[in-house]
Every structure is written in structure tokens, then in C-alpha cells.
Amino acid sequence: MHLSLYRRFRPDSFEKMVRQEHIVRILKNQIEGNAIGHAYLFTGPRGTGKTTIARIFARAVNCEHPKDGSPCGQCPTCRALQEGSLDISEIDAASNNGVAEMRDLREKVQYPPVTGKYKVYIIDEVHMLTDAAFNALLKTLEEPPAHAIFILATTEPQKIPATILSRCMRLDFKLIPEEDLEKHLKSILDEIGKPYEEEAVAAIARAGAGSDRDMLSIAEACIVYADTLTYDAVCAVLGAADFHETAKLVSAMLTFDLETAIGCVERILSEGKSVGVLMKDILQLLSRITVAKTCNNAEKLLSLPKELYAEIKSIADRADGRAVLRATEILIKTESELRYVSSPRISLETAILRAAHPESDADSEALIVRINHLEEELKKGVTAASAAPMSEVRHAETPPAGEPPEDDFSFPEEEPIFEEAYFSDEPAPRSRKKAEAPAPQPAFQPAPPAAEVQQGEMSAEVAFGKFMRTLRKTPKSGVLFTMCSDLLATYEGETLVLTTESDTIFTALRRDDHRKAMEEIFSGMGVTAFEVRKKGAKPAMKSAIEELKNNFGDYPIEFK
Ligand SMILES: [Zn+2]
């Protein structure tokens, strides 16, 4: 009979558990001190050992001579329990969520155990019980017979009624660190005599994302691939596109191409990868890029398949070292906060936004990254025409005929803007061609006093707040939400003007799909005219030099 790796190597004693030592210690102490509780709640992510520990505990409390808290495996009770016994019942609440099962349990629990001292009920996925079933269970928990132990296991403790929680001893299982997963997988591979590449094991452990069960089922799929467990086989199973897509994301982030970076995030997450795993992948790639950038023997140190190393090396060569460091710092900070935020995806996107977008930060590290980037652009001889367009686009207008496809962000119908506009704090004027358009541009008329316009209306701040709340609830709007968080809202006449300091966000918000999504929400709110505007003027060549001068006038930089 074929047994899955997970079942075949399921620990049968506390000593064999992968981590969760904080829980093992408590349970062992209770067994040795004969201070066993009647109800436990095991909570934590899937595949971290909740049911496994519950089973070991159920046998340990019944064992006649427990060894260091673990079941001895030798005594008659241990043997009887190994065969399967009425004394240990596992109930899967996901498939038995009815009140009938809980009433049945309530009745049967009254009968004394057959072989050992205790009857143990393990109720898995307990959060799936219906309210009526919880009530029935509660009655049992309120007056448990002396021989009964309940272990409730769940990934979602917040769904358990407080009345149940208050009667349980709660033990929180933790995600298993990658190095422990690696160690566990290696010990299994050694035991079954399967040769492996280090990198393959590392990749599988990473893909397990803290879950032993997930890791072993991935390993299982990879093992049958070839005689030796190779990194290539793992890539083939996990999808090799994986690495390349992450590499594309990181490369875009490091070269400040926000649009591509966020697009990659969208694609990767839509393929089912979790935010946490993507975050880990990005961080690992960043650390490899750092090695490739700084170490002479990087190829040997990283010991990656040739083509992967080549890809990493080429990103490293193109990226600014400080930008790599800064991105790493931002992402590490975000990763540590990830488990406490309600929307990890928005946190990830904001982190990428910041990393890909040093303009949004005023700290000196960001300024240096920005300077390097600007110098790089200057070297390339970027012209004003190819840089981010200067003039605003009125989102309420119908797009002009012959508008380029939505992925093309250049607006050829607009001419380059000239210097006089560059150094003004005022919004940049439209290009001459636009200015000749028949419709007057209210943005450039003197704004009427605010009170006059806003009488009986929402203030800009309130309107924008309402917009953001609606946007947050809109499905698949994470990217847009992140970008809009940066906007400053004011009224000019009846037009709600949204200002950004970022070229990237300004350009991205002009995109058809983003514009339509915003339009829809605004018109639902009764806001008929809005406009996204770039703050001040910031063309490439001239302002780049200006900016360098402004920010680093005291530094010995030669401006050419
Ligand atoms: Zn025993």
C-alpha cells in the first residue's frame, strides 16, 4: 500500500515533532505532573502539527509508562490504541458540522473508556460547527465526565464562540521555520535513500511556507520526477515561470518601473501564490542579487543552475547597490509587520511602491538612490519628450481618437513642454496644442473661493475619504488603492483635483482601466468632474539637474 510521505513519517512521539517545542513542553509537564485539563484549543496555520500533537497527547495520557511524557509504544494500552480504539475519536467538523453529531458525542462520552484511563475527542476544524452544534458541545464542556478530554483544533480561532474559548486551554501553533523544514525533509530523504541537491531541498522547504504537511506533499510530487531530487525537477513541479516572474518583478522594482512591478505582483498572486510566500521569494532574490553584486565568488557561493545565476547576475549588474539595499530594508520591515495587518496585499504593494519609487521618501538613503537614478538617466541622455508627460489629462474627457493602446503610456499628441514651465510651482500649462482646444480648461481659470463652491457639498477631503473607502471594498482594486493613497484632494471650482508628486503614479492613473474604475466610483458618489494632476513640473533633463542642485547643492557634485 502506498502511504504518503506525510503519513508515513508522521511523528508518533513528542521528540519527533518538528518545532512547536513550546506546546510540547506544556503538554509533557501536564502528563508528568498528572495535571491534565479537560479541554484544549489548538490553533495555528495548517500543516503545523495540531492533529499530530493531539494524537500523541491522546496516547500519552493513556500510556501506562509514559517515557519523558511521550507514549512508550510498548505497553498493552499503547498497542491497543495503535490498532485504533473507541477511546480516541477524531471528528472532522468540516464534514460533521451538525448538531446531531454533537448530541451523539454528548451521549457517548458518558461511557467509560475501554482500554485506557481517558476518552479523547479530537475535533478538527472545529470552527466549522454550526451555532446549534457549538451549543450542544458547550453543554458537554460545561460538565465533562472525569474521563473525557476534548482537543479542539482550528486554523480560525476567531470563529470560536467566547463561551467555548473560556473553557479551553488555548495553545498556539507557530509556522515552522524554513531551516527546520529543510532539516526534516533531508532526514526523510536520507531515510528513503533518495539523493538530492541542496538547492532542491531549499526550494521545497520554501514552497512549504511554514507547513510541514504542505512541504511533504510538494516533496512527494517532486520525488517521482527523477532518480535524484534536482532543483530543475522542483522548478518543473512548482512551475519554473515562478522564478522568472519574480525576477522580472524585482528587476522592475530596482529600475523604478513601478507599472511593470505591480503588474507582476498582480499576475503572481492571481496564480494562487500567497503574499507571504511572494514576499519571501522577493527577499531571497534580493539577497542573491546582493551577493552577485558584491562577492567575487558569487557564482560558487550561490551554487544555482547556470541560467538562473545568469539572470540574477544581469539584474545585479543593472541595479544600483543602494537601491537593492533600500528595497531589502523596506521589504524586511514590511514582512515582519505582515501578520498583523488586515490586508497583507496592500502592505506588499505599498512596500514595492516605496522601493520602486524613491521620490516618495525624503530620507537621505532615498535621495541618494534617486540621485543615482537621475544621473543614470542623464547619462543616457533622456530627452524631455520621452519622459513622463507634463500636462494633465482630464479624466472626465472622452479620450481623443487614435489614443494609443492602454499599455502605451506615451501620449504622442502632446508636444514636449518647454523650460519656462519647469521652475514654477504652479501646475504646468497644457501643451500648446492642447491649449488651442476649443473647450476651456477650468483648471487654469482662477479658482472661485472654496466656500462658494462647496456650499452644500462634501469637502474635498470627505469626498476623497469616501472614494477610498469604496475603492477598498472594490474587488481587485489593490493596485489602484495603493496608488491613490498617495493623492492629495482639493476642489478647484467643481472639479475634484487629485494631486500626486509622483510621475509614476500620475502616469499609471491615466491608464484606461484605472481611469474607468475611478470614474465609476466618483460618479456613484455624485462627483461629476475630477482630474489627476502632477504636482509642480518635473521634466527629465532640466529638472533632474535642478533637483540635484536643490537637494545636493552643498555636495561636491559637478553638474554638466
Ligand atoms: Zn505505553
Image (cartoon, grey):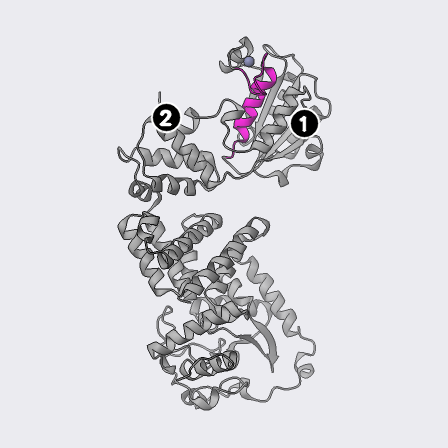
> Which residue corresponds to mark 1?
136
Disc 1 on helix, strand or loop? helix
Q: Is residue 425 magenta?
A: no
Q: Badge 2 is on which residue?
A: 191
Residue neighbourhood size for the residue with mark 2, other residues' Cα within 10 Å, grouped as few (<14), some (14–19), many (≥20): few
In front here: 261 or 520?
Answer: 261
Tell whether label 2 touches label 1 (CB within 8 Å).
no
Disc 2 C-beta below 8 A from ligand 1: no
User: Relative to residue 481, is residue 379 depicted above or below?
Assistant: below
Quadrant in which residue 129 is drawn: top right
- For the image, the number of numbered tags is 2
Vertical position of residue 370 compared to residue 334: above or below: below
In the rendered image, residue 21, in percent from the top left (x then y), is placed at 56, 32
Question: Residue 417 placed where, x, y %?
Answer: 42, 86
- Whether label 1 lies within 8 Å of ligand 1 gets the answer no
Q: Looking at the image, which is closer to me, 153 or 351?
A: 351
Q: Position of residue 67 (x, y in %)?
A: 56, 17
Q: Is residue 544 visible?
A: yes
- In reply to whether residue 63 is colored magenta, the answer given is yes
Which span of residues is magenta-colored? 48-72
Query: Can residue 509 be seen in the rendering of this structure?
Result: no
Q: Which of marks 1 and 2 is in front?
A: 2
* Quarter of the render that holds ligand 1: top right
Q: Which amino acid does label 1 sit on?
A: Ala
